[in-house]
Image: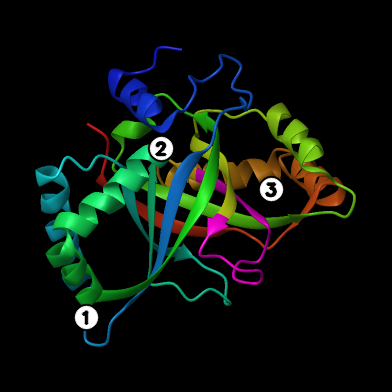
Amino acid sequence: LNISLKLITLALLLNWAPLQADHHAAPTQAVAMESAICQLNPGKSMDDFNDALGTFKTWAKNNDYNTLMTVNTPLYIGGGTDIDILMLEFTNYENMGAGWDKIGQTGAEMLTAVDAAASCRRALAHYFPFHAADGIAEDDDRVLVVNWCTRHEGVSWDDLNAVHRSWEFDDMTGYAGMIIPALGIRDGDYPGEFGHLRVYKDAAALLAVQNQIANEGGWRPREDYFDNYADCAGSNAYLQSVVTSPN
């Protein structure tokens, strides 16, 4: 594949392996994924939150803080989900640790600005990338889909990894991977023991995939997965905006 320089830079920073030519899921090492589930504070709006993000972006630029940070707001959300804003941040573990040390040293004013706009619960997860499409890193406005799942009794992680490696992705799916909770998450916090993450170029790509599932036989491998490997809670979809990306 002819992968753009920006995507190669992103892949190196996040330890994302180059995409295989047949678009099968490739085994890769995990990267750190920090999530913040946020509620706007009383009297605050998304404009206030975006102003606070401006403070964060300035701080990040001045402190050489290079991660992939996205803000996600609900598009299609299940009734049991109470999220105004979902923030996701990706980088390797070394960068994540160094970043928090920088925040501790120089980021107090920035954190105060964000905390004044929204109250957030942070957690750390291991993110295992399956797929990264050519050019997706250059899109700043995308659609995120997350679905939490739990293995069937008797299904091992090796069984699950094998079926995940068999999956194929086309370029309608920008990113695909698996989330494994690490820190700040207890049993019952999420409706599953692992999550599937997908990022699509736009809403048109998201709905094209739904058309494949409904009208072009895409429901068959989906049902096979549900029948033989895992029960899943159901997908939530968010409008995604990139706040910062690796230089």
The answer to which of marks 3 and 1 sits earlier in the sequence is 1
- The residue under label 2 is 92
Dots 3, 1 in contact, CB < 8 A: no
- Residue drawn at x 34%, y 33% is 137
Dots 2, 1 in contact, CB < 8 A: no
The answer to which of marks 2 and 1 sits earlier in the sequence is 1
Q: Secondary structure at mark 2?
A: loop
In front of the other: label 3 or label 2?
A: 2
Check the image and report above or below for 42 versus 140: below
- Residue drawn at x 46%, y 12% is 1
- The residue under label 3 is 214
Q: Can residue 47 be seen by looking at this rendering?
A: no
Q: Secondary structure at mark 1?
A: loop
Location of residue 41 in the rendering, given as x and y in whole percent from the top left corner: 28, 82
Q: Amino acid at mark 2?
A: Asn
Relative horizontal placement of residue 170, taking residue 244 as reference (left or right): right
Residue 41 colored in magenta in the image: no
In front of the other: label 3 or label 1?
A: 1
**Residue nearer the viewer, 71 or 190:** 190
Q: Secondary structure at mark 3?
A: helix
Q: Amino acid at mark 3?
A: Ala
Location of residue 64 in the rendering, given as x and y in whole percent from the top left corner: 17, 40
Residue found at the very far bottom of the displayed protein = 42
In front of the other: label 2 or label 1?
A: 2
- Residue drawn at x 79%, y 41% is 220
What range of the chain is rendered magenta?
Answer: 182-198
Check the image and report above or below for 179 versus 104: above
- The residue under label 1 is 44
